[in-house]
Image: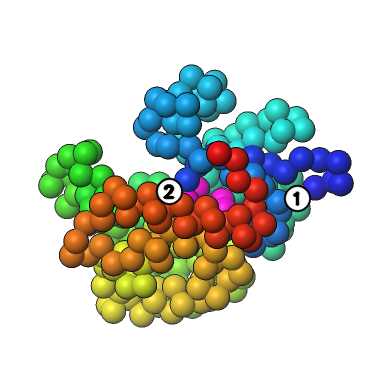
Amino acid sequence: MTQASKPVVLYGIPFSQPVRAVIWLLLYKRLPFDLVPINPGSKGDNGSRSPAYLAKNPAGTIPALEEPDTGFVLGEAHAILCYLSNKHGWNDVYPADPQQRAKVDWYLHYHHRNLREASIGLVAPKIRKDLNIPENTQQAARSTFTRALRALESGWLTQSRYLTGAALTLADFAAYMEIGQLQPGFTNLFDFAPFPNVQRWLDEMQQVDGHDDAHVVLSTLGDISVEPPSIETIKHANISALAALKNRGAGLTL
């Protein structure tokens, strides 16, 4: 970022896994950013279905990234992660070597219909009762997630420290958001004992700079395996996360 340029703007809330992936990368690379809270599904002024937000991101999803200096707007977390890495030359997390980069892209494409299913099968039914997710949909998502976890256990993480090799990449940031949220220290919604390679990787990821600040929302929310959280509890977790990010140096626009 040049001295005269303005920080990028990130739209979303810390409770969102894709938003957290971008937050964590920005913290890890120490790139200044302003976080504008956007309420998913709401048509209010700060909602993802508001006319103003839809004008920026017609899909109405979070996160979205905006560059105030150029007016450039980009949606979808993985696209944002790759764009930021390309723009700033972050070849440590998005390798310049075509084959190594392709392995990162391989996981990012695989993620959406596999480990991302954790949100539908394990987390969403606990925190979004209003969605009325059918039991058969939940079961299918749990099965898909478990199969994907087995693939990581017996494949990607068998001989590698991280998902695509010896070095931390965007694949790890993205994958951890879905897997890591289920740990006992957070929502406690999955038993990782049968997956020692995954557990070792989870422990490694917790040591990555920015992890704790990016996950305040989950540490504040706590164990929801027995008692689903109230709306007030979820709001408090988001507020605590926003305060932590502000203390870390990220801007906050309300």
Q: How is the image coloured?
A: rainbow
Query: Is 163 a magenta residue?
Result: no
Viewer-nearest of discs 1 and 2 = 2
Q: Residue at x 52, y 68 (%)?
A: 212
Q: Is residue 172 visible?
A: yes
Who comes first in sequence, dot 1 or dot 2?
Answer: 2
Q: Position of residue 217 (x, y in %)?
A: 43, 58
Q: Which numbered marker is on residue 212?
A: none
The amino acid sitting under disc 1 is His
- Crowding around mark 1 (Cα neighbors within 10 Å: few <14, some 14 to 19, many 20+) is few
Q: Position of residue 192 (x, y in %)?
A: 30, 74
Query: Is 22 a magenta residue?
Result: yes
- Crowding around mark 2 (Cα neighbors within 10 Å: few <14, some 14 to 19, many 20+) is some
Distance between the alpha carbons at the discs numbered 1 and 2? 24 Å
- Front-most of 101 and 38? 38
Label 1: element kind: helix
The amino acid sitting under disc 2 is Ser
**Residue 76 against residue 29 in the figure, above or below:** above
Range drawn in magenta:
14-23
Residue tagged by mark 1?
Answer: 88
**Residue 180 against residue 20 in the figure, above or below:** below
Label 2: element kind: loop
- Front-most of 22 and 95? 22
Q: Residue at x 69, y 63 (%)?
A: 92
Residue tagged by mark 2?
Answer: 16
Q: Is residue 104 visible?
A: no
Q: Residues at badges 1 and 2 in contact (C-beta under 8 Å)?
A: no
Q: Position of residue 254 (x, y in %)?
A: 55, 39
- Front-most of 177 and 142? 177
Q: Residue at x 35, y 61 (%)?
A: 221
- Outermost residue, right direction? 3
Q: Residue at x 50, y 48 (%)?
A: 19
